[in-house]
Amino acid sequence: MSIRQLPEDLINRIAAGEVVERPASVVKELVENSIDAGARRIVVTTANGGMDLVRIADDGHGMDRDDLILSVERHATSKLSADDLDDIRTLGFRGEALASIGSVARLSVASRPAEAESGLVLVVDNGRRSGPMPQAMNRGTVIEVRDLFAQVPARRKFLKGVRAESSAITDTVKRLAMANPQVHFVLEGADRSASNWPAISGEGALEARLGQVMGADFVENAVPLALARHGVVVAGLAGLPTYTRANSLSQFYFVNGRSVRDKVLVGAVRAAFADYTFRDRFPVVALYLAIDPGEVDVNVHPAKAELRFRDQGAVRGAVIKAIGMALAAAGFKASSSVADDILGAFAAPEMERAAPTSMPMPASAAHYGWRNERAPLHLDTRPGQLSGFTEPSGRVESVDIALDAVDYPLGTARAQMFDNYIIAQNDTGLLLVDQHAAHERLVYERFKAQMAEGIVPSQAQLIPVIVELPEEDCARLEEAAPELEKFGLYLDRFGPRAIAVRETPALLGNTDISGLVRDLADGLAEWDSAAALTGRMEAIIARMACHGSVRSGRRLRVDEMNALLRDMEAVPHSGQCIHGRPTYVELKKGDIERLFGRSR
């Protein structure tokens, strides 16, 4: 078959396939044009998921007759002041959006600049152009796209249902609104509930816009990012490690005002939170990067959704550093959503049978409607005493509650419950602390600090501890022994099926050495080789910290409990354990009053 030149309408349809994937793509292209035109109010109207109608109205600069005619031509743009694709300072740059849309839909573009007495409208119906003609309108531009892909059934059939397409448009407008707090966005239509995000300016505008779009709950449970490093400026908000989601849909990335998907940024966020979240949980972030346009190529994707950084290492390092500093500054703070979950778990006990109203209620707790048959609860009511609730499932340690200072952030210890949970009181409410999870984080952070200094103190065993293991586990540990010495663990092969442990990290104290060695052997089997240890430093430290922490079931003295609380206040990231779970929950006085119906 000989080579031939394709007709213009087919060329436009091929270009449309690159730029216009679905109605949301149309919205993105047109709203970006409105923002570049200086619009301060943008109204997006849709019908049938955008398949029947997408209408964008703005109050931007508008276009005169010559610009209006050129706007629907291919490779025509106002976004490049010079022919330099390495210096893109606008959101749009390809110059194909309107031409591509007009080749697969009924497109009308009406516009009026501020100095004109009236506007003009130009229509492109699946590639056939008419106009421009006069039209009365306010300053700005109104673009309507009707019957998208109606004459391209092969493309139309690949669109999803109305709900899915509407949701994609909502997500697109959300991202544009998050990137441009100075613009008033309205999203409406017969196929959706209306959304209205008024413009915000001045200090705190970005945080306020994120609160509008993502919700006040996110802002309350996030830390601010602020770092300038190696020519990269990082801003935005990062959710606390205990404020996570089951997927990555709540992660938003913006580079020079453009919403993007980029594996470098995704990987950097994953690395920054690696110490603090479950492997199957995803942090919530709104990450904004400002970088010299010459250091980033935004022209690598037809829909401008991806980009390429010239120095990926600098960008990755800046993001990890910014998030690390922010989380460290948050200290022991845990998300308030944990307390909300606790409150939701409480329920008033139901009465098994109604008591006669003329008779006084018996003193025994067994008559107060408990659903299961428990032993009566006996509470020591002497002044200044919280005595043990004696019941089969646990106990509460008695602690003197004289009115001492409670102005510490994590309060003063009042009791220990079930030999694992510390009950503390501060000046605003009550806290429940998981002693094992909290101490596990403290040991982990101390281990990391010692590793950073290059010295992990060890303590010798009076008699080497012999741990019997399968021969293959012994071989793995023997191979890894030189690397494990960096962590303060010294061991040797002791016959074909045993390991002799001579020294252990001093931080672990009197730990279960046998359990620790078996746990490390399991890890080596999972990681395949001793060579993988270098990249598994955090995992090894985490295993050691778990064995070196205060165990569940250990009774603590009051001074030990308070010492743990003070250490938590002093050590960053102590609000969550090394597995991503919260180490404490806080119930404000108002929350407790709500449980008893006392709040108004």
Image: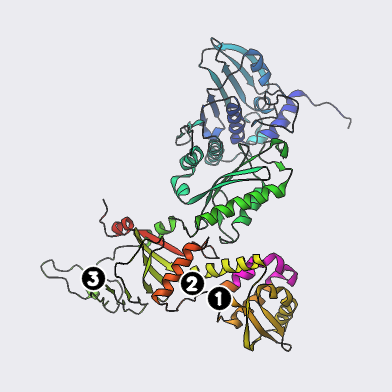
Q: Residues within 10 Å of mark 1 (few under 14, many from 20)?
A: many
Q: Quadrant of residue 513?
A: bottom right
Secondary structure, magenta segment, majority class: helix
Give the residue type at disc 2. His
Residue receiving disc 2: 436
What residue appears at the point 38 percent right and 62 percent down from the top-left corner? 345
Front residue of 98/309: it is 309
Q: How many marks?
A: 3
Lower position in the chain sequence, tag 2 or tag 3: 3
Front residue of 516/460: it is 460
Q: Quadrant of residue 518?
A: bottom right
Where residue 600 sits in the image (x, y, percent)? 26, 50
Mark 1 and mark 3 residues within 8 Å of each other at the beta carbon:
no
Residue receiving disc 3: 368
Instruction: Note whether 12 is above or below 68 in the view shown.
Output: below
Q: What label sits on residue 548 in the rendered view?
A: 1
Q: Is residue 424 left or right of residue 218?
A: left
